[in-house]
Image (cartoon, rainbow, N blue to C red):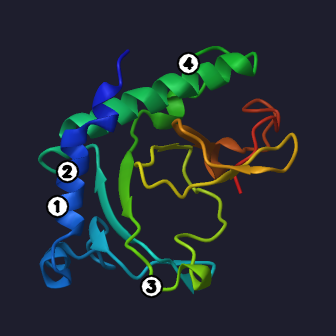
């Protein structure tokens, strides 16, 4: 399987163009209580406003250029679920039934320049509520993860796969508590 499109310059240019638009233009596709997909810039993590803009969509309702990206990321996530099952000594298809009628959400984050970076954080420490999160960061970077072995914070130059709360199921037949949601 090839995932070159995920890091495609074409997608990055599209996203840069979108997030560079004036606020009033981006808010034409505003996400709210009734419309759960679209643009949003006032999200909070643990009651603190995040320094970011987001654009949410689903694989089932992708945006024009993001269609191929969404399908490829979903394929990658499903392949990873099979590998996780195998690593736990379970059949590769162990988790398939949980995701037959799924909705795969795609979130594109943009972290605009901050006038006082020492006073802000893009997103506070949190757990992801889904099954898996596939993260790819641009050349600007900023995402850090703590290495469990020594507690050191590192900025990876690779895809980050976060296990979410859904896979951290205490039921022994699922993961035998071997998977921890990233925090």
Kindly state the secondary structure of the residue where label 2 is placed.
helix
Q: In the rendered view, tell whether residue 54 sits above or below residue 72.
A: below
Marks 4, 2: nearer the viewer = 2
C-alpha gap between disc 4 and disc 2: 37 Å
Q: First in sequence: mark 4 or mark 2?
A: 2
Inspect this view and state whether residue 61 appears. no
Q: First in sequence: mark 3 or mark 4?
A: 4
Q: Quadrant of residue 148?
A: top right
Q: Residues within 10 Å of mark 4 (few under 14, many from 20)?
A: some
Q: In the rendered view, tell whether residue 105 sits above or below residue 50.
A: above
* Front position in the image: 169 or 15: 15
Residue tagged 4:
93
Labels 4 and 2 touching (C-beta < 8 A): no
C-alpha gap between disc 3 and disc 4: 48 Å
Q: Quadrant of residue 71?
A: top left
Q: Quadrant of the N terminus?
A: top left
Q: First in sequence: mark 3 or mark 2?
A: 2
C-alpha gap between disc 3 and disc 2: 24 Å
Residue tagged 3:
115
Point out residue 98 in the picture as x, y percentages from the top left corner: 53, 35
Residue tagged 1:
17
Residue tagged 2:
13
C-alpha gap between disc 1 and disc 2: 6 Å
* Front position in the image: 36 or 171: 36
> Residue sitting at 54 percent across and 50 percent down?
130
Point out residue 134 in the picture as x, y percentages from the top left corner: 49, 41
Point out residue 104 in the picture as x, y percentages from the top left corner: 38, 45
Inspect this view and state whether residue 64 appears. yes
Marks 3, 2: nearer the viewer = 3
């Amino acid at each position: 399987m090839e995932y070159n499109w995920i890091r495609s310059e074409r997608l990055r240019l599209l996203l840069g163009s979108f997030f560079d638009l004036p606020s009033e233009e981006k808010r034409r596709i505003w996400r709210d209580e009734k419309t759960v997909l679209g643009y949003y810039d006032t999200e909070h993590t643990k009651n603190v406003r995040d320094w970011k803009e987001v654009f949410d969509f689903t694989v089932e309702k992708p945006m024009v250029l993001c269609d191929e990206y969404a399908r490829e990321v979903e394929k990658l996530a499903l392949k990873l679920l099979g590998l996780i099952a195998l690593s736990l000594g379970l059949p590769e298809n162990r988790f398939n039934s949980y995701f037959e009628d799924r909705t795969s959400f795609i979130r594109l984050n943009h972290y605009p320049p901050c006038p006082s970076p020492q006073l802000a954080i893009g997103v506070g420490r949190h757990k992801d509520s889904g099954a898996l999160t596939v993260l790819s960061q641009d050349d600007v970077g900023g995402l850090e993860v703590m290495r469990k072995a020594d507690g050191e914070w590192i900025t990876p130059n690779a895809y980050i796969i976060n296990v979410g709360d859904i896979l951290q199921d205490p039921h022994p037949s699922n993961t035998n508590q071997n998977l921890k949601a990233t925090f």
